[in-house]
Image (tube, grey):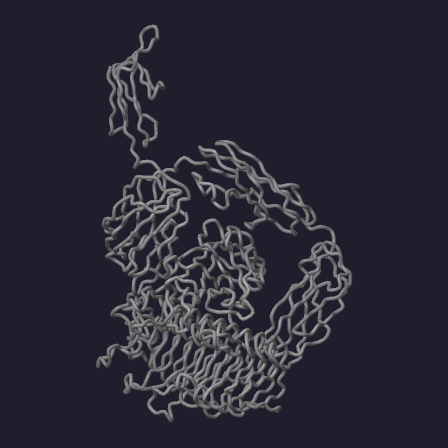
Amino acid sequence: MRLSWDAATDNVGVTGYEVYVDGQLKASTAATVRTFTDSQPASATVTYTVRAKDAAGNLSDPSAAVTRPGDPGTPGSNLAGGKPIEASGQAWTFAPANANDNNTATYWEGNAGAYPNTLTVKLGSDADLQRVVVKLNPDAAWGARTQNIQVLGKADGATGFTSLKAAADYRFDPASGANTVTIPVTGRASDVQLRITANSGAPAGQVAEYQVIGTPAPNPDLTVTDVSWAPQTPNETTAITLRATVKNVGNLPSPADTVDFLLGGALADSVALPALAAGESVTVSKSIGTRPQGSYLPSARVDADNSVRERNEDNNLLAAAGPITVTQAPGPDLEVLDVTPNPASPAAGAPTSFTVQLRNRGIDPAPAGVTRLTVGTATLNTATPAVAAGQTVSLPVTGTWTAVAGGATITGTADATGTAAETNENNNVLARPIVVGRGAAAPYASYEAEDGAYQGELLQADAERTFGHTNFASESSGRKSVRLTSTGQYVEITSTVPTNSIVVRNSVPDAPGGGGADTTLSLYANGVFVQKLQLSSKHSWLYGTTDQPEGLTQTPQADGRRLFDEAHALLPQSYPAGTKLRLQKDGGDGAAFYAIDLIDLEQVAPPTAKPAECTSIADFGAVPNDGLDDTAAIQAAVTADQNGTIACVWIPAGQWRQEKKILTDDPLNRGAYNQVGIRDVTIRGAGMWHSQLYSLIEPQNATGSINHPHEGNFGFDIDDNTQISDIAIFGSGRIRGASDGSEGGVALNGRFGRNTKISNVWIEHSNVGVWVGRDYDNIPDLWGPADGLQFSGMRIRDTYADGINFSNGTRNSKVFNSTFRTTGDDAMAVWANKYVKNTSVDIGHDNSFTNNTVQLPWRATGIAVYGGYGNKIENNLVYDTANYPGIMLATDHDPLPFSGQTLIANNAIVRSGGAFWNEDQEFGALTLFAANQDIPGVVIRDTEILDSTYDGIQFKTGGGTIPDVKVTNVRIDRSNNGAGILAMSGARGSASLTNVTVTNSAKGDVVRQPGTSFTFTNG
């Protein structure tokens, strides 16, 4: 009797009577030869035996045996798909999540030059590993490359990674048809890491798809098998009980845990779950009280905190087959739908009337009552007739409000005197802002996190809004934000506008060693998951106690600042006004905390079509969204326009990588760096949300490709007659400055000259957004200060220094209808410096900053003027400066003198001023600082200064004089730690005060410190 195994066919052959596999009968025959194919898993090692049987049916002892070895490379599945994945860093938008999204068209790329790059997928529990598969885009455009890769693993409970496969070079070549490498590994791990130390085709590691093939190790496995509720047809007054059945489908017992009940994805309540043996199930229930009318899809989630190590971490959530429908209860229910002012945008002093849209959403009539409108300090009560069930009425409000500069909040309240017994008493109030003549007409609506619904910690600044010591609230809009630390915590707002985009101002933790970390946060709309938002701390977190920006470091320590950054995304659809948008920390959102400050919603228009007269950069070889540098193509297109070969440069929708400044080649090679800008060029894009230029290499690391250590490797150098519109420039800067003179780059810089207009350009993550001017001695032959320069619709965010600085003799130029947020120096400034051709002629003059909104400068001033004449600051809104004035006139930085008039008119300055320079200097919200020269001709009128950290208006000690300041129609309220108006002990000069009101000031209304010669008179 003989037994054999054919490895090629996996067939077992026998000469004999019966075949047993591990003691079980598999086949019998009287023939001399019989074969069969076994169905045992290919991974298993199986022993086959043969026993003889006599005529009486008696079996002999095994007389033959053969062992088939298991094949661990054949079975198993991809355990990494969609699992939490993180990296040591990322290049721009090439996030780690791209590497396990089952799409080779997207990819992760590490930080340039920051080897080793690591990419780690968290499987959730231990698995027995067989191999990892690393893929790149198979498109031939990628080209061949070799990456040096080591595979490491960390098992449950382990404190560190161990090597599973030693580092080796792996070649990726689309010419082979796959661009994929397979790396065999063995071992058990829950976290599997790629460690990449070289890439011949890019400055960092790249992975389009990362697969981990294996089988789950023995563990419990909790899953929800059923979700139900009672009663089946509740109304608004009926308490609802939710039920869930949970089963342990694993092969080990599970410990006690909890079950979360959710409605529309939002946590409703939790209930305890007992320990379950393998295969055991239990039903748990919880009353969640009443809910307003509507449909709610219930779901249940077990082990939400991932405290139970399971074979499968992706089967813990189950939604019911259909929603709970909560019907209306009998009774009326009044709500304010809208409040409409007339005129819609009143001027200061204009009588303003209002119309309220009032609806009875109940199923019974509402009795007559009172609708109340409060706006500013005015209260307008209007008699309201009875409103039939389902009826909407337009109710003219009795009385008017006199518009006050700076605007107010309108609050409409239905049934203000409580005459109606309503089914819902919590939906009677609607609040909305009314803006009067100030600020930018931004295309987005902003929402404070703390004004929405939230589960998390409310962060509030201390009384002095202390800065620089990791004070999140001090750096928050409104000096408040909300921190999420636990799974299920959220911030939820209700949109007042339709939107297909979102911007979130947030702070997430730095990497332990500095340099930033990437994470996700979950977005829901009306309880339905929308997408993961990609957040990063790469462009936040500077450390140190010094206030000298070049002295700050990226090495973590106790004192952090520049804590916030922004994340933005286009959404998969448009959501109407009234949508509840929720930012929620889900189980896969791995940051230790999320500080949520502001949310912007905007209905972004589709990409604009290419104008007929323009030529696309794609015609010059640029390829969107491929991660490769498009600088040569962009430069060729701009040069062709400059030479008159084409009429206009078109940047289509897409992400275009740019790693070198666009400028003009200098045939004379004047200076160590080429500082000749472009001229006579028009550059247009499909919209700032659509046509985006980005850089991955930090300027200080861009050896050989920077325009100048101060100006960097991205954006445009402009000399004259240039128009740029409807694009975004996302820089790679992460520093203000370094000891070697390098900086974080400038998006737009140069001489700018005449007839240059820049509109609708979004700038982020540069050292400076726009620096206008070059020193005369740079290239004297090209001297040409900006004259008539215009900026409009600018969106400048998250810089390390200035937003827009008018320098080197800039004149007759303006910034209007633009927004600035989180600048690291003055958001807007005129610096009439001396580095000009003729100091008696080339003085910064007749520039204006008009109808702009400035928020949250994390260093220096909202709007500043240093010297010159005829400069104007009008109709602006300035909020929340961290440590300096909202508006300042000063003669530090050694400017050319002030002369003529400098006008500060119709501005609002809110929550501004602060302590700086080792916290020894306390700045007012509006500060005049004659450091070493006089500041004559100042007019301050029609201005509101509200909720200042220290003084409202401050005349600061200095070596110069501030004579004959005219202060007219100014309201100062709540100078929290200072005076309404303060003349410091060393201040010199005078001011006349006409129709100036000061209220609620901590240290007096108009105060002269002992020793000052500054005088005040009533106008």
Residue depicted at x 35% and y 77%: 749
Residue 448, percent from left and from top: 55, 64
Q: In the image, residue 328 lies at what x, y percent?
A: 69, 51
Residue sticking out furthest to the left: 668
Q: On screen, 516 above or below 672?
A: above
Name the residue located 23 percent from the left edge and 50 percent from the top edge: 169
Residue 981 image point, x, y percent: 57, 83
Image quadrant assignment for residue 760 = bottom left
* Above or below: residue 491 compared with residue 8: below
The quadrant where residue 734 appears = bottom left
Note whether residue 818 is visible.
Answer: no
Kindly give the residue lying farthest to the top in the view shown.
56
Residue 682, compared with residue 9, is above or below; it is below
Q: Quadrant of residue 758?
A: bottom left
Figure check: 375 above or below 212: below
Is residue 704 shown to the viewer in this render? yes
Q: Nearer the viewer, residue 608 or 752?
A: 752
How far across and how far down the image is residue 853, in percent? 51, 74
Q: Residue at x 61, y 91 (%)?
A: 1019
- Quadrant where the N terminus sits is top left
**Camera-nearest residue between 989 and 789:** 989
